[in-house]
Amino acid sequence: MQYWLMKSEPDDVSIDDLAARNTVGWYGVRNYQARNFMRDTQQVGDGVLFYHSSCEQPGVAGFARVASSSYPDPTQFDPNSKYFDAKATLEKPRWMQVDVEYVRKTRLLSLSEMRQYPELAEMLVLQKGSRLSITPVSPAEWRFIQDLLA
């Protein structure tokens, strides 16, 4: 089992939206490294830290799990979508997504609070210049955050 931090803008899909729907497709990823994590590495059952980004108070808002293998992101084919990619075809999709399933909402573990714990100092989300929407989380970091938000 592996662990991931996956960022979502709460105006688009929040932890409350995930709770209401139970499962959502993680659409709109347009970074090759993040796409490759979904396509090549993520497995059904992997743990997810659901992270609210690009908002007033960014941070971990809950826990989820990867609920499907990767499959083509349908928004790449929709000319009315802001995620449309004219170079993507049904035969050769460029962008993938996985389904993410709700586990539980937590209190918000803010980015500023995360920076206070030496146990989390190596987390990719805390590194200068890190903007990836999907990053691996070590088992030790996962356990620390689980305990913190228990």
Image (tube, rainbow, N blue to C red):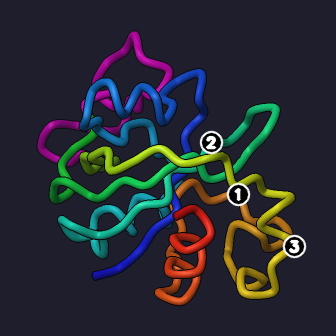
Kindly check if marks 2 and 3 are in contact, taking CB atoms under 8 A apart as contact.
Answer: no
Per the image, the residue denoted by label 2 is 52
The answer to which of marks 1 and 3 sits earlier in the sequence is: 3
Q: Amino acid at mark 1?
A: Arg
Which stretch appears magenta?
Answer: 74-93
Compute the Cα span from label 1 to label 3.
Answer: 20 Å
Of 10 and 127, the residue lying toward us:
10
- Residue 2 drawn at (x, y percent): 35, 79
- Residue 23 drawn at (x, y percent): 24, 37
Relative to 116, is 26 above or below? above
Count neighbours of disc 2 (C-alpha within 10 A) and say few if under 14, some if 14 to 19, many if 20 or more.
many
Per the image, the residue denoted by label 1 is 131
Q: Secondary structure at mark 3?
A: loop
- Residue 63 drawn at (x, y percent): 43, 55
Of 146 and 127, the residue lying toward us:
146
Relative to 86, is 136 above or below? below
Per the image, the residue denoted by label 3 is 116
Kindly check if marks 1 and 3 are in contact, taking CB atoms under 8 A apart as contact.
Answer: no
The answer to which of marks 1 and 2 sits earlier in the sequence is: 2
Name which residue lies at 30% across and 58% down.
65
Magenta region, main secondary structure: loop
The answer to which of marks 2 and 3 sits earlier in the sequence is: 2
Q: Please check the rendered image and state whether residue 91 is part of the magenta-colored stretch, yes or no.
A: yes
Assign the N terminus to one quadrant of the image: bottom left
Kindly check if marks 1 and 2 are in contact, taking CB atoms under 8 A apart as contact.
Answer: no
Q: Amino acid at mark 3?
A: Gln
Tell whether 111 sits left or right of 92.
Answer: right
Name which residue lies at 19% across and 54% down.
67
